[in-house]
Amino acid sequence: MRSVSRVRVALCGMLCLGLTACSGGPASKAPASHPTRSSAPQSPAQPSTGPAAEAAVRAMWQTFFNGAVPIPRRLGLLQNGQRFASFVHSEEKTSVGTLVLSASARVSRVTLQPASAATVIYTILLGGKPLAKNLSGTAVYTGGSWKVADSTFCSLLHLAYGKSSHVIPAACGS
């Protein structure tokens, strides 16, 4: 089935796009991978409601799915991101990771939900062309900022690698 193959490629692309594509740009522009020891917050809390929250979710989602953003920054945009760090670093040099360097996501809709969550409808673009349209994911508001829900990331992993794959990290409950 050609469409199943295309969806699998799209999902693999999302997986790598989300975190595992090799990061681009000079190292000097990369944010520190270790938090500072200061008790002062590094940035003010993002809004959790209203149009400003929707805009924050949209911006976060597009940053998370941007192959040019360094991996440590993208791990910081994933709920419980450090639980996935080992997996991400093991996958970043795969052929799929190389393929998605030019991939990105375009968010078409953000719908805020009760309990500090949002549904995100988005399209994966490869070489500027839609590869997978109208995908649905979840963002969660935690610690004063919006993050891609680890359940969304795990769902992408299961779809990309298969439910019984040995590659799926333990953080996904495999």
Image: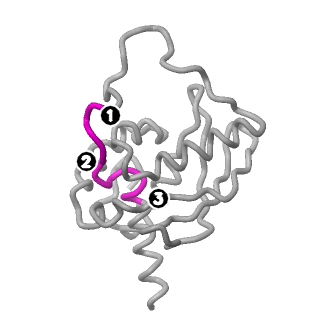
For the view shown, which residue lies furthest in the top direction?
39
Mark 2 vs 3, N-terminal side: 2
Question: Which region of the structure is painted magenta?
Answer: 15-28
* Residue at 27%, 44% in the rendered image: 86
Mark 2 vs 1, N-terminal side: 1
Mark 3 vs 1, N-terminal side: 1
Residue on which disc 2 sits: 89
The type of residue carrying mark 3 is Ser
Quadrant where the C terminus lies?
A: bottom left
| Vertical position of residue 41 compared to residue 20: above or below | above
Q: Nearer the viewer, residue 130 or 34?
A: 130
Asked if the residues shown at circle 3 and circle 1 are in contact, with their CB atoms under 8 angstroms apart, the answer is: no
The answer to whether residue 35 of the structure is visible from this angle is yes
Mark pair 3, 1: CA separation: 19 Å
* Residue at 63%, 38% in the rendered image: 56
Asked if the residues shown at circle 2 and circle 3 are in contact, with their CB atoms under 8 angstroms apart, the answer is: no
Mark pair 2, 1: CA separation: 16 Å
Residue on which disc 3 sits: 104
The type of residue carrying mark 1 is Ala
Secondary structure, mark 3, is strand
Residue 147 screen position, x and y as percent: 54, 40
Quadrant where the N terminus lies?
A: bottom left
Residue 33 screen position, x and y as percent: 31, 29
Judged by depth in the image, the label closer to the viewer, 2 or 3, is: 3
Judged by depth in the image, the label closer to the viewer, 2 or 1, is: 1
Residue on which disc 1 sits: 30
Q: Is residue 159 left or right of residue 25?
A: right
Secondary structure, mark 2, is helix
Judge the density around disc 3: few (<14), some (14-19), many (≥20) Cα neighbours within 10 Å: many
Image quadrant of residue 141?
Answer: top right
Q: Is residue 65 left or right of residue 21?
A: right
Q: Nearer the viewer, residue 163 or 57?
A: 57
